[in-house]
Image (spheres, grey):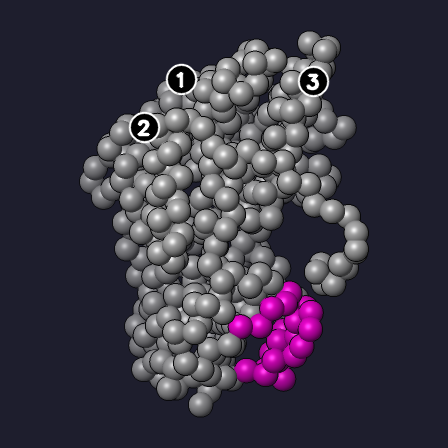
């Protein structure tokens, strides 16, 4: 029985586990978190729409249904291709075949200080941290007697006009329009400034122009200021410097502008391409090797239709995992990967969403319901599906959430090993 090590328990890694032949492979999955999560809904954690537990599912519980599959917690510290070993924070695993499905992380494009000074929604931990900071600003703003300082505290800048940026900006706009008047009477809605900046000439660049225009209109309805053709050059001491030389104060900057492949220590540089993604062939093999593969966001497979690689979204990751499992189960690489684009969607708030399906685009309430249905079906666990549906139903009719809780972590005792 061959030893198959998979790095990453996201869409790609988990779907590979589900499809691989457990009689042929003994599977060991490595992930720094002991749960699978659902990134498309991270923005709802950051905006208090859902609790983190609602969109996460324990990997060990999922693996109970699969024979010869084990979970190993840890950060990858090194890959030795000659010895065929993967070293993590806590152990060294030997493998016969290695699949890297580690996903992506924030890309700050070489700008110093952004990692330390900006907030993100790329992981569950980041989304929870961002939620706490948003609530902190609202509570401090409610107490502040200085009108100028209050406006500074309640200034939110979202960088990046992709789906994540549009969705978190829309969620903040809903808080400004519907939550502040009810729950924060000390704050005038105009005191809260929400601005989204995008470096290109339209939002949702991967979607059709019609959907981009509709998303822009929705954001304006929610009192979000959108600046197109605006690029951030620096963010230091709460001041943002833009490409046109403008310098403005922003208390909270939420970064959604770009992603890159998760770094893999020990992987030869010639295997890594643009944006930190691992270069693969049409079978998802790395360097033509049968014992090393990469799938999902971290994999860069170029083709005539996708000269820069497939979009870093759930569907390419899932389809690549299924195709790779098919090849591995047959014991030979004979099925080339071909991506079937099922369309894309983005939501801007209640009753406000845009959808691009093959040959057709639509928006509004129907797109919003379709967005909810697809995301609900994709969640793991019936309990999560039920809880999320109840939360969405309650919030739809009341615009009220019991999740606006400011949960500051304790400092001691120190747990340095968690950061290994």
Q: Is residue 47 above or below residue 266?
A: above
Q: Residue at x 74, y 47 (%)?
A: 410
Question: Which one is earlier in the sequence, the residue at label 1 or at label 2?
Answer: 1
Q: x and y percent of residue 254 in the render?
A: 59, 34
Cα–Cα span, label 1 and label 2: 12 Å
Per the image, the residue denoted by label 3 is: 143
Per the image, the residue denoted by label 2 is: 351
Q: x and y percent of residue 338 in the render?
A: 30, 61
Dominant secondary structure of the residues highlighted in magenta in the image: strand
Disc 1 packing (10 Å; few <14; some 14–19; many ≥20)? some
Cα–Cα span, label 1 and label 3: 28 Å
Which residues fall within the magenta stretch? 71-95
Q: Nearer the viewer, residue 88 or 73?
A: 73
Q: Nearer the viewer, residue 345 or 408?
A: 408
Check the picture and name the quadrant holding the C terminus: bottom right
Question: Which one is earlier in the sequence, the residue at label 2 or at label 3?
Answer: 3
Per the image, the residue denoted by label 1 is: 221
């Amino acid at each position: 029985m061959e030893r198959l090590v998979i790095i990453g328990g996201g869409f790609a890694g988990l779907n590979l586990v589900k499809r691989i032949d457990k009689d042929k492979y003994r599977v060991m999955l490595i992930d720094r978190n002991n749960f699978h999560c659902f990134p498309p809904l991270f923005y709802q954690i950051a905006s208090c729409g859902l609790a983190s537990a609602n969109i996460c599912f324990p990997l060990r519980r999922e693996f109970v249904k699969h024979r010869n599959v084990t979970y190993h917690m840890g950060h990858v510290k090194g890959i030795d291709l000659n010895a065929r070993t993967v070293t993590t924070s806590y152990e060294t695993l030997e493998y016969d075949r290695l699949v890297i499905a580690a996903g992506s992380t924030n890309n700050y494009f070489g700008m110093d200080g952004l990692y330390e000074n900006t907030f993100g929604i790329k992981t569950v931990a980041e989304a929870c941290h961002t939620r706490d900071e948003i609530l902190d600003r609202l509570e401090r703003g409610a107490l502040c007697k200085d009108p100028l300082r209050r406006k500074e505290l309640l200034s939110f800048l979202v960088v990046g006009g992709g789906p994540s940026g549009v969705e978190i900006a829309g969620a903040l706009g809903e808080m400004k329009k519907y939550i502040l008047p009810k729950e924060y009477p000390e704050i005038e809605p105009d005191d809260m400034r929400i601005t989204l900046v995008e470096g290109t000439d339209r939002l949702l660049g991967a979607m059709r122009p019609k959907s981009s225009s509709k998303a822009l209109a929705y954001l304006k309805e929610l009192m979000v200021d959108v600046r197109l053709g605006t690029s951030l050059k620096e963010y230091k001491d709460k001041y943002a410097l833009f490409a046109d030389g403008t310098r403005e104060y922003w208390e909270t900057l939420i970064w959604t502008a770009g992603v890159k492949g998760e770094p893999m220590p020990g992987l030869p540089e010639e295997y890594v391409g643009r944006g930190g993604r691992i270069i693969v062939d049409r079978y998802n093999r790395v360097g033509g090797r049968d014992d090393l593969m990469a799938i999902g966001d971290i994999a860069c497979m170029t083709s005539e239709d996708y000269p820069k690689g497939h979009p870093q979204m759930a569907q390419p990751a899932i389809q690549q995992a299924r195709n790779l499992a098919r090849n591995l189960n047959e014991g030979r690489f004979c099925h080339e990967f071909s991506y079937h684009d099922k369309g894309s969607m983005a939501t801007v708030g209640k009753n406000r969403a845009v959808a691009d399906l093959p040959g057709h685009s639509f928006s509004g309430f129907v797109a919003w319901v379709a967005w909810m249905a697809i995301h609900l079906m994709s969640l793991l666990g019936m309990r999560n599906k039920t809880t999320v549906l109840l939360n969405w139903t309650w919030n739809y009719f009341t615009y009220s959430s019991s999740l606006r809780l400011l949960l500051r972590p304790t400092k001691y005792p120190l747990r340095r090993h968690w950061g290994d």
